[in-house]
Image (spheres, rainbow, N blue to C red):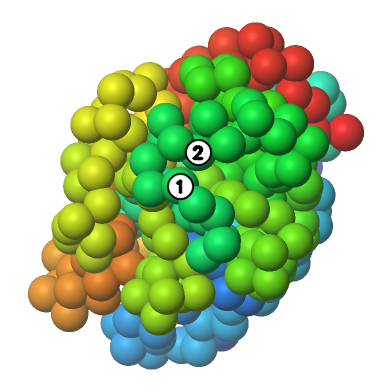
Amino acid sequence: MRALLIFGFLLAGALPVAAATYPERPIRIIVPVPPGGSSDFTARIVGQKLVEALGQNVVIENRGGASGVIASEMVARANADGYTLLMSSSSTHGIGPVLYRKLPYDAIRSFTHVALINTIPTAMVVHQSVPANSIREFVALAKARPDAYSFGSSGGGSASRLMGELFKLETGAPLTHVPYKGSGLATLDLIAGQVQVMFDGLPSHIANIKSGKLRAIAVLGERRSAALPNVPTAAEMGYPRIEGSLWYGVSGPAGLPREIVEKLRKEIFRIDALDEIRERFAGAGAFPSPLGPGEYTKFIAAENAKWAPVVAASGATAE
Protein backbone atom coordinates (compact mmCIF):
# COMPACT_ATOMS: atom_id res chain seq x y z
CA MET A 1 0.00 0.00 0.00
CA ARG A 2 2.84 2.37 0.91
CA ALA A 3 4.47 1.71 -2.48
CA LEU A 4 1.20 2.51 -4.24
CA LEU A 5 0.86 5.76 -2.32
CA ILE A 6 4.40 6.80 -3.20
CA PHE A 7 3.74 5.97 -6.87
CA GLY A 8 0.56 8.06 -6.78
CA PHE A 9 2.42 11.05 -5.35
CA LEU A 10 5.07 10.69 -8.05
CA LEU A 11 2.41 10.73 -10.76
CA ALA A 12 0.71 13.73 -9.21
CA GLY A 13 3.99 15.62 -9.12
CA ALA A 14 4.97 14.71 -12.67
CA LEU A 15 2.22 16.71 -14.35
CA PRO A 16 3.39 20.22 -13.36
CA VAL A 17 6.92 19.31 -14.37
CA ALA A 18 5.75 18.17 -17.81
CA ALA A 19 3.66 21.32 -18.15
CA ALA A 20 6.59 23.51 -17.14
CA THR A 21 8.82 22.07 -19.87
CA TYR A 22 6.08 21.97 -22.52
CA PRO A 23 6.57 21.61 -25.42
CA GLU A 24 9.37 19.09 -25.68
CA ARG A 25 8.44 17.74 -29.11
CA PRO A 26 6.45 18.87 -32.17
CA ILE A 27 2.81 19.89 -31.73
CA ARG A 28 0.12 18.82 -34.18
CA ILE A 29 -2.75 21.14 -35.03
CA ILE A 30 -5.48 19.12 -36.70
CA VAL A 31 -7.36 21.19 -39.28
CA PRO A 32 -10.79 19.70 -40.06
CA VAL A 33 -10.81 20.69 -43.74
CA PRO A 34 -8.52 20.21 -46.75
CA PRO A 35 -5.95 22.94 -47.52
CA GLY A 36 -7.27 26.19 -48.95
CA GLY A 37 -10.08 27.25 -46.61
CA SER A 38 -10.34 29.83 -43.84
CA SER A 39 -9.57 27.28 -41.12
CA ASP A 40 -6.37 26.23 -42.89
CA PHE A 41 -5.45 29.89 -43.47
CA THR A 42 -5.77 30.69 -39.76
CA ALA A 43 -3.97 27.55 -38.60
CA ARG A 44 -0.93 28.15 -40.77
CA ILE A 45 -0.55 31.78 -39.76
CA VAL A 46 -0.83 31.02 -36.04
CA GLY A 47 1.20 27.79 -36.32
CA GLN A 48 4.14 29.63 -37.85
CA LYS A 49 4.20 32.12 -34.99
CA LEU A 50 3.88 29.36 -32.38
CA VAL A 51 7.01 27.74 -33.83
CA GLU A 52 8.92 30.96 -33.22
CA ALA A 53 7.52 31.40 -29.72
CA LEU A 54 7.70 27.83 -28.41
CA GLY A 55 10.86 26.61 -30.15
CA GLN A 56 9.21 23.45 -31.47
CA ASN A 57 7.80 22.51 -34.83
CA VAL A 58 4.06 22.91 -35.26
CA VAL A 59 2.70 20.45 -37.82
CA ILE A 60 -0.51 21.44 -39.59
CA GLU A 61 -2.38 18.22 -40.38
CA ASN A 62 -5.43 18.47 -42.62
CA ARG A 63 -8.07 15.84 -41.80
CA GLY A 64 -11.12 16.78 -43.84
CA GLY A 65 -14.39 14.90 -43.97
CA ALA A 66 -17.81 14.79 -42.31
CA SER A 67 -17.76 18.57 -41.74
CA GLY A 68 -15.08 18.31 -39.10
CA VAL A 69 -16.45 15.32 -37.19
CA ILE A 70 -13.48 13.08 -38.11
CA ALA A 71 -10.90 15.63 -36.97
CA SER A 72 -12.83 16.60 -33.84
CA GLU A 73 -13.26 12.99 -32.71
CA MET A 74 -9.56 12.37 -33.34
CA VAL A 75 -8.61 15.22 -31.00
CA ALA A 76 -11.27 14.40 -28.41
CA ARG A 77 -9.75 10.90 -28.10
CA ALA A 78 -6.12 12.07 -28.06
CA ASN A 79 -3.90 12.19 -24.98
CA ALA A 80 -4.48 15.34 -22.95
CA ASP A 81 -0.83 16.38 -23.12
CA GLY A 82 -1.00 19.42 -25.41
CA TYR A 83 0.64 17.75 -28.41
CA THR A 84 -2.58 17.18 -30.37
CA LEU A 85 -4.74 20.26 -30.82
CA LEU A 86 -7.75 21.10 -32.99
CA MET A 87 -8.53 24.14 -35.08
CA SER A 88 -12.06 24.33 -33.71
CA SER A 89 -14.51 26.44 -35.62
CA SER A 90 -18.01 27.68 -36.28
CA SER A 91 -18.57 24.49 -38.28
CA THR A 92 -17.12 21.94 -35.86
CA HIS A 93 -18.39 23.43 -32.61
CA GLY A 94 -20.87 26.19 -33.41
CA ILE A 95 -23.14 24.47 -35.92
CA GLY A 96 -22.16 20.79 -36.02
CA PRO A 97 -23.47 20.06 -32.50
CA VAL A 98 -26.98 21.26 -33.43
CA LEU A 99 -27.00 19.92 -37.00
CA TYR A 100 -25.88 16.34 -36.37
CA ARG A 101 -28.37 14.15 -34.58
CA LYS A 102 -25.61 12.18 -32.90
CA LEU A 103 -21.91 12.93 -32.46
CA PRO A 104 -19.20 10.68 -30.98
CA TYR A 105 -18.25 13.47 -28.55
CA ASP A 106 -19.74 16.39 -26.64
CA ALA A 107 -18.82 19.79 -28.07
CA ILE A 108 -18.25 21.23 -24.59
CA ARG A 109 -17.35 18.40 -22.19
CA SER A 110 -15.10 16.41 -24.55
CA PHE A 111 -12.72 19.33 -25.12
CA THR A 112 -10.59 21.91 -23.40
CA HIS A 113 -11.30 25.09 -25.33
CA VAL A 114 -8.07 27.08 -25.16
CA ALA A 115 -8.72 30.30 -27.07
CA LEU A 116 -10.73 31.91 -29.84
CA ILE A 117 -8.37 33.39 -32.46
CA ASN A 118 -10.33 35.33 -35.05
CA THR A 119 -13.68 36.04 -36.60
CA ILE A 120 -14.34 36.22 -40.33
CA PRO A 121 -17.55 37.70 -41.74
CA THR A 122 -19.16 35.51 -44.38
CA ALA A 123 -19.92 36.83 -47.83
CA MET A 124 -22.38 36.00 -50.57
CA VAL A 125 -20.19 35.20 -53.56
CA VAL A 126 -21.50 34.32 -57.03
CA HIS A 127 -20.14 33.02 -60.33
CA GLN A 128 -19.27 35.85 -62.68
CA SER A 129 -22.04 34.87 -65.12
CA VAL A 130 -24.84 35.45 -62.57
CA PRO A 131 -26.62 38.66 -63.71
CA ALA A 132 -27.33 40.05 -60.25
CA ASN A 133 -25.70 42.82 -58.23
CA SER A 134 -27.88 42.71 -55.13
CA ILE A 135 -29.60 40.16 -52.94
CA ARG A 136 -33.00 41.25 -54.25
CA GLU A 137 -31.93 40.77 -57.88
CA PHE A 138 -30.44 37.35 -57.11
CA VAL A 139 -33.59 36.19 -55.32
CA ALA A 140 -35.71 37.30 -58.29
CA LEU A 141 -33.51 35.26 -60.64
CA ALA A 142 -33.70 32.17 -58.44
CA LYS A 143 -37.48 32.39 -58.11
CA ALA A 144 -37.88 32.83 -61.86
CA ARG A 145 -35.86 29.64 -62.51
CA PRO A 146 -36.38 27.42 -59.44
CA ASP A 147 -34.17 24.54 -60.64
CA ALA A 148 -31.31 26.61 -62.02
CA TYR A 149 -29.51 27.86 -58.91
CA SER A 150 -27.52 25.90 -56.34
CA PHE A 151 -25.23 26.85 -53.51
CA GLY A 152 -22.02 25.07 -52.57
CA SER A 153 -20.79 24.55 -49.03
CA SER A 154 -17.76 23.07 -47.30
CA GLY A 155 -19.88 20.16 -46.04
CA GLY A 156 -23.30 19.04 -44.94
CA GLY A 157 -22.66 20.11 -41.36
CA SER A 158 -20.67 23.27 -42.10
CA ALA A 159 -21.22 26.92 -41.26
CA SER A 160 -21.38 27.78 -44.96
CA ARG A 161 -24.22 25.28 -45.37
CA LEU A 162 -26.20 26.84 -42.50
CA MET A 163 -25.62 30.33 -43.88
CA GLY A 164 -27.20 29.13 -47.11
CA GLU A 165 -30.16 27.67 -45.22
CA LEU A 166 -30.57 30.96 -43.35
CA PHE A 167 -30.52 32.82 -46.68
CA LYS A 168 -33.25 30.54 -48.06
CA LEU A 169 -35.41 31.01 -44.97
CA GLU A 170 -35.13 34.80 -45.04
CA THR A 171 -35.60 35.28 -48.81
CA GLY A 172 -37.59 32.29 -50.00
CA ALA A 173 -35.02 31.65 -52.74
CA PRO A 174 -35.33 28.04 -54.04
CA LEU A 175 -31.65 27.04 -53.89
CA THR A 176 -30.32 23.47 -54.05
CA HIS A 177 -27.56 22.63 -51.58
CA VAL A 178 -24.41 20.92 -52.91
CA PRO A 179 -21.96 19.82 -50.15
CA TYR A 180 -18.21 19.45 -50.71
CA LYS A 181 -15.31 18.16 -48.63
CA GLY A 182 -13.96 21.59 -47.83
CA SER A 183 -14.31 25.18 -48.96
CA GLY A 184 -11.42 24.91 -51.42
CA LEU A 185 -13.15 22.20 -53.46
CA ALA A 186 -16.45 24.06 -53.42
CA THR A 187 -14.71 27.21 -54.62
CA LEU A 188 -13.25 25.39 -57.63
CA ASP A 189 -16.73 24.37 -58.74
CA LEU A 190 -18.06 27.86 -58.08
CA ILE A 191 -15.39 29.30 -60.40
CA ALA A 192 -16.27 26.64 -62.97
CA GLY A 193 -19.99 27.49 -62.72
CA GLN A 194 -21.04 24.07 -61.42
CA VAL A 195 -22.69 25.91 -58.51
CA GLN A 196 -23.81 29.52 -58.71
CA VAL A 197 -23.36 30.89 -55.20
CA MET A 198 -21.57 30.32 -51.89
CA PHE A 199 -22.05 31.83 -48.44
CA ASP A 200 -18.56 31.52 -47.08
CA GLY A 201 -15.64 33.15 -45.27
CA LEU A 202 -13.78 35.81 -47.23
CA PRO A 203 -10.25 34.29 -47.11
CA SER A 204 -11.36 31.52 -49.46
CA HIS A 205 -12.51 34.01 -52.09
CA ILE A 206 -10.67 37.34 -51.83
CA ALA A 207 -8.11 36.55 -54.55
CA ASN A 208 -10.76 35.28 -56.98
CA ILE A 209 -13.00 38.28 -56.30
CA LYS A 210 -10.16 40.71 -56.96
CA SER A 211 -9.16 38.85 -60.14
CA GLY A 212 -12.73 38.98 -61.44
CA LYS A 213 -13.35 35.23 -61.41
CA LEU A 214 -16.04 35.65 -58.75
CA ARG A 215 -18.20 38.52 -57.55
CA ALA A 216 -19.19 39.42 -54.00
CA ILE A 217 -22.79 40.59 -53.74
CA ALA A 218 -22.97 41.17 -49.99
CA VAL A 219 -21.00 40.87 -46.77
CA LEU A 220 -23.05 38.92 -44.24
CA GLY A 221 -21.53 40.51 -41.16
CA GLU A 222 -22.39 43.40 -38.86
CA ARG A 223 -20.16 45.80 -40.81
CA ARG A 224 -18.44 46.07 -44.16
CA SER A 225 -15.13 44.30 -44.62
CA ALA A 226 -11.92 46.32 -44.88
CA ALA A 227 -10.88 43.88 -47.61
CA LEU A 228 -13.99 44.71 -49.68
CA PRO A 229 -15.02 48.21 -48.58
CA ASN A 230 -17.35 48.79 -51.54
CA VAL A 231 -19.43 45.67 -50.92
CA PRO A 232 -22.50 46.46 -48.76
CA THR A 233 -23.78 44.32 -45.92
CA ALA A 234 -26.97 42.30 -46.19
CA ALA A 235 -28.48 44.62 -43.60
CA GLU A 236 -27.80 47.61 -45.85
CA MET A 237 -29.74 45.82 -48.58
CA GLY A 238 -32.72 45.30 -46.30
CA TYR A 239 -31.94 41.82 -44.94
CA PRO A 240 -30.65 42.38 -41.37
CA ARG A 241 -31.35 38.80 -40.28
CA ILE A 242 -28.96 37.31 -42.86
CA GLU A 243 -25.91 37.62 -40.63
CA GLY A 244 -23.27 35.20 -39.48
CA SER A 245 -19.54 34.89 -39.14
CA LEU A 246 -17.01 32.13 -39.32
CA TRP A 247 -14.71 31.84 -36.34
CA TYR A 248 -11.65 29.80 -35.45
CA GLY A 249 -9.91 28.85 -32.25
CA VAL A 250 -7.69 26.27 -30.63
CA SER A 251 -9.07 23.38 -28.59
CA GLY A 252 -7.60 20.22 -27.12
CA PRO A 253 -8.88 17.07 -25.45
CA ALA A 254 -10.72 17.40 -22.16
CA GLY A 255 -8.40 17.56 -19.18
CA LEU A 256 -5.51 19.55 -20.63
CA PRO A 257 -3.26 20.68 -17.75
CA ARG A 258 -3.99 24.23 -16.68
CA GLU A 259 -0.36 25.28 -17.12
CA ILE A 260 -0.32 24.12 -20.75
CA VAL A 261 -3.63 25.81 -21.48
CA GLU A 262 -2.34 29.07 -20.03
CA LYS A 263 0.91 28.90 -22.00
CA LEU A 264 -0.99 28.37 -25.26
CA ARG A 265 -3.58 31.04 -24.44
CA LYS A 266 -0.89 33.59 -23.63
CA GLU A 267 0.92 32.97 -26.92
CA ILE A 268 -2.29 33.08 -28.97
CA PHE A 269 -3.24 36.41 -27.40
CA ARG A 270 0.26 37.75 -28.09
CA ILE A 271 0.08 36.57 -31.72
CA ASP A 272 -3.36 38.16 -32.16
CA ALA A 273 -1.93 41.50 -31.01
CA LEU A 274 0.95 41.58 -33.51
CA ASP A 275 0.61 44.27 -36.18
CA GLU A 276 1.84 41.81 -38.79
CA ILE A 277 -0.91 39.32 -37.93
CA ARG A 278 -3.60 42.00 -37.77
CA GLU A 279 -2.59 43.14 -41.26
CA ARG A 280 -2.65 39.59 -42.65
CA PHE A 281 -6.05 38.94 -41.10
CA ALA A 282 -7.41 42.26 -42.37
CA GLY A 283 -6.21 41.49 -45.89
CA ALA A 284 -8.42 38.40 -45.84
CA GLY A 285 -11.38 40.12 -44.22
CA ALA A 286 -10.72 38.67 -40.76
CA PHE A 287 -10.09 40.37 -37.45
CA PRO A 288 -8.58 39.14 -34.16
CA SER A 289 -11.14 38.12 -31.53
CA PRO A 290 -9.15 36.71 -28.61
CA LEU A 291 -11.17 34.93 -25.93
CA GLY A 292 -9.70 32.79 -23.14
CA PRO A 293 -10.85 29.30 -22.09
CA GLY A 294 -13.89 30.27 -20.05
CA GLU A 295 -15.11 32.93 -22.46
CA TYR A 296 -14.50 30.73 -25.50
CA THR A 297 -16.50 27.88 -23.97
CA LYS A 298 -19.43 30.24 -23.25
CA PHE A 299 -19.16 31.64 -26.77
CA ILE A 300 -19.49 28.14 -28.24
CA ALA A 301 -22.58 27.45 -26.13
CA ALA A 302 -24.11 30.74 -27.33
CA GLU A 303 -23.45 29.82 -30.97
CA ASN A 304 -25.21 26.48 -30.45
CA ALA A 305 -28.23 28.35 -29.10
CA LYS A 306 -28.15 30.80 -32.03
CA TRP A 307 -28.15 28.19 -34.80
CA ALA A 308 -30.49 25.58 -33.29
CA PRO A 309 -33.66 27.48 -34.39
CA VAL A 310 -32.29 27.79 -37.95
CA VAL A 311 -31.73 24.03 -38.09
CA ALA A 312 -35.22 23.40 -36.73
CA ALA A 313 -36.92 25.83 -39.12
CA SER A 314 -35.03 24.68 -42.22
CA GLY A 315 -35.24 20.97 -41.45
CA ALA A 316 -31.56 20.70 -42.33
CA THR A 317 -29.62 17.62 -41.31
CA ALA A 318 -26.00 16.67 -41.85
CA GLU A 319 -26.71 13.00 -42.55
Say what amino acid the circle numbered 2 marks. Answer: Phe
Residue drawn at the location 51% of the way across and 82% of the way down: 58
Q: Which residue is mark 1?
A: 132
Answer left or right for 9 relative to 114.
Answer: right
Quarter of the image with the C terminus is top right
Residue in front for this viewpoint, 136 or 75: 136
In which quadrant is the N terminus drawn? top right
Check disc 1 and give the amino acid type. Ala
Residue at x 20%, y 47% (from the top left corner): 224
Against 61, residue 143 (above or below) is above
Visible residue check, residue 95:
no
Residue at 27% over, 39% down: 233
**SS of the residue under disc 1:** loop
Q: Quadrant of residue 243?
A: top left
Please give left or right for residue 282 compared with residue 166 in the image.
Answer: left
Task: Report which residue position mark 2 lands on.
Answer: 138
Residue 123 shows up from this direction: yes
